[in-house]
Image (cartoon, grey):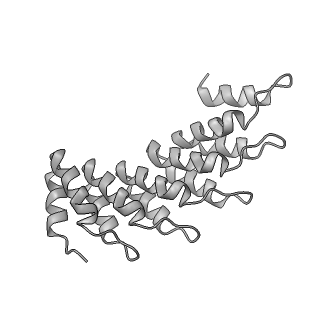
Amino acid sequence: RNQAAMIRELVSRPVHPAPANYRNGALLSWAAKRGDVALMEYLLRRPTDAPTPDINDSKALLKAASGGARNARTAARLLLTWPDRAARADARNGEALVRAAGGGHDGFVRLLLSWPRHAPRADVRSGAALVAAAEHGHTSTVRLLLSWRVNAPRANVGGSAALAAAAARGHTDVVETLLSWPCH
């Protein structure tokens, strides 16, 4: 049996079931990180002990952002659109954006930045998302953040922290992008 099947079995046991909101949403976070939307829906729809998408300050959204699973954006949409206590796209001061940018997950970054309610700023936390993308060599993510139409970070944000991070890791494409990008 796989882990998801074991979780379903433990939560649905007739005698002494494990609570679906076990350890402050750990099961929901586990499913979100793996992009297991079916298990997420199963847990969220539990009639008694269901976790809420915003449990533990939207930790499941952060796990989806950093997990890189194939269905990560679908998992995020589920958490962001759940009718009861939906996760916030800007939870934990934009941490999901920083994690998605650091992982080079452009689609996830776009999803968060364009979310209609509580979207994080592209320049969140003094350019932390840009620095994370640069540090890990994600040139397309760096370009995406710099070109975002609202609140784009400056290429030289934080005393050129993104440039220093990219150079220290030998990411020449990112360094060239940052050096050639007009500071605005």
Task: Say whether residue 58 is visible.
Answer: yes
Q: Is 178 left, or right, of 85 in this rendering?
A: left
Quarter of the image containing the N terminus? top right
Identify which residue, 25 or 157, lies in the foreground. Answer: 157
Q: Is 65 left, or right, of 1 in this rendering?
A: left
Which residue corresponds to the image point at 72% horizontal and 38% vertical from the top-left?
21
Residue 76 is situated, as x and y percent measured from the top left of the image, at: 56, 54
Q: Quadrant of residue 173?
A: bottom left
Which residue corresponds to the image point at 64% horizontal and 35% vertical from the top-left?
27
Quarter of the image containing the C terminus? bottom left
Which residue corresponds to the image point at 51% horizontal and 54% vertical from the top-left?
73
Identify which residue, 18 or 163, lies in the foreground. Answer: 163
Residue 136 is situated, as x and y percent measured from the top left of the image, at: 27, 47
Residue 20 is situated, as x and y percent measured from the top left of the image, at: 73, 36
> In this picture, is 161 found above or below 36?
below
Q: Quadrant of residue 84?
A: bottom right
Task: Say whether residue 71 is visible.
Answer: no
Residue 88 is situated, as x and y percent measured from the top left of the image, at: 59, 59
Q: Is 161 left, or right, of 152 in this rendering?
A: left
Number of marks drawn: 0
Which residue corresponds to the image point at 76% horizontal and 43% vertical from the top-left?
50
Q: Is 14 left, or right, of 34 in this rendering?
A: right
